Amino acid sequence: MTRHSLSFVVAIATVALGSGRLLAGQGRAGQPPAPPPTAKAAAPIDLTGSFVSIVTEDWRWRMVTPAKGDYQSVPINAEGKKVADAWDPAKDEAAGEQCRSYGAAGLMRVPGRLRISWQDDNTLKVETDAGLQTRLFHFGAWKAPAQAKPTWQGDSVAEWESGGRGGATTGSAPGTSDGGSRRFGDLKVVTRNMRPGYLRKNGVPYSADAVLTEYWDLYKEPNGDQYIVITTYVDDPKYLQQMYVTTPNFQKEPDGSKWDPTPCSAKW
Amino acid sequence: MRNVKTIALTLTLAAILLGRVPAAYAQVELGGNWVSLQHEDWEERGPGPEVVDYLGLPLNAEGRARALRYSTSSLSLPERQCLYYPPHYVVLGPQGLRLWADFDPTNGQVVAWNISAAIDRAVIKIWMDGRPHPSENALHTFAGFTTGVWEGNTLTARMTHFKEGYLRRNGVPSSDKATFTMHISRHADTLTITGIIEDPVYLTRPHIVNRTWKLDPSSNINPVTNPCVPEAELADLKGEGTVPSYLPGENPFINEMTRMYHIPLEAVMGGADTMYPEYRKKLKDAYVAPTICTRYCCGWGGAAGATAPGLQCVTGGNGQINER
């Protein structure tokens, strides 16, 4: 390749890079940039609808209340064990603390149904029939109110993580009909300011300092099934030796006809 | 001729920069050593499930009947000692994983992703080059045949053509008609694999399981497995021997879960309806929690593996049941 040709290649590449930036910026010189799209408009995946827990994991610790002192699989520390060993559901009920196992850090593992909708263009709402809880995922520049009182569901900040394109590395895309055109991505949610609660019905605790990080993925199967899988991290140095990582999953249902509102219970 | 080459190179470069050709590489780097995080189903994956525990499995009657005939002692038969689990054991077992790519040496394209073997499972190769699955009548192997496609940052792999084996280590069967889908997603330094197992012979609906691993470059995970050499382990299994199993209605362990954990037998037997929230409500009046945990209570690491000072746990131990 001559030096002249090389210069031509570099020039074309520069133009290509520049046009990419221009497209990404959505604006032209002298004109104000377009406002960023709302979270609802920018959603790479559609999480809205009715979903049901499919309890295939940790059945014995989720579908029934396990025995006191059963912390199996939880990286609990000595302080956490001390709290769990003092678990008294009757005392919780009497103190109006019956929703302790329905706080954000444990709620998605409680068997039940989800109703997911947009409360507004930048707030995704997740309601549960188990415990009648509502989680609000705030996108954009939302800030939690200063010195807000901790709640069961805490303050959740959300962002879409873009997933790029689909398709095989080379050749066609086996096993999917729309690889290459569908939008992909996941939802990242970070929740703080939670009231102390339980990771498990039998009083395995998380503290007010716990931070919950979740990645919501949506998988569509060739037979039409849709699953939400939530990779969930609970970071709580007060009661855990390391991050507690779980992955509850939900299957989409055609409608909300099986929604069964059930109040919090400390005993069941 | 030189000009033609220059123009072609220019157009290719421009197209790549504008993102108009397929990426030559994976969207996400999956390669590396991943250690297993066993914060879910530790007992099933670690020491092993209870002898008769089909909780959370969408078993049909045939699958349940075959599971109840199983005796773990059958694995002592020399001809069974070196049998692998089916490839879906990658999400059902406890092992860490090593993932690596095979590249086309002529253009650097990823031709396949590989998931390391375990002592009891073959290497899984996920073909990424668009090749079709073989005929339905083609050979079934311990590794199966798998093709993959990127769905955004998730690698979705669909597997067929693997041998029959077990869905749970206590003898719940998996047939050679089963298929296995994996959605492999990386979030920061955590790998999540969602496994969906469909089996028209033994399951009434897809069985979905999610597992996580943490990236650990310092871990030493063997990509292949060591050779297995069978030998007669039990005196009465040498020579003519028998095939350990239980006749219908004679499994002596059928009530263990009810005795130890107060789980009704109907739930222990599994079935799709036991996987939904409605079933939890059905159990409400039939279940009374044991007063205290007596076995594997800490699970994760137990007291010996725990780093927190003063932590004491009931670990039970393999084969040891602490009676209340």
Image: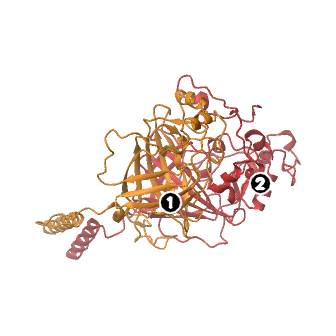
Asked whether the viewer can see residue A63, the reply is yes
Displayed quadrant of residue A212: top left
Q: Residue at x 62, y 42 (%)?
A: B42
Residue A62 locus on image (x, y percent): 62, 46
- Label 1 resides on the chain identified as A
Of all residues shown, which one is farthest toward the right?
B240
Q: Which of B233 and B72 is in front in this view?
A: B72
Q: In this view, does B179 lie to the left or right of A232?
A: right
The amino acid sitting under disc 1 is Arg
Q: Chain A takes which shade in the image?
A: orange
Q: Classify 10 Å Cα crowding around label 2: few (below 14), some (14-19), many (20 and above).
A: many
Q: Which of B315 and B154 is in front in this view?
A: B315
Label 1 – label 2 distance at C-alpha: 37 Å
Asked whether the viewer can see residue B101, the reply is no
Q: Chain B takes which shade in the image?
A: red
Of all residues shown, which one is farthest toward the left?
A30
User: Does mark 2 fall on the same chain as mark 1?
Assistant: no
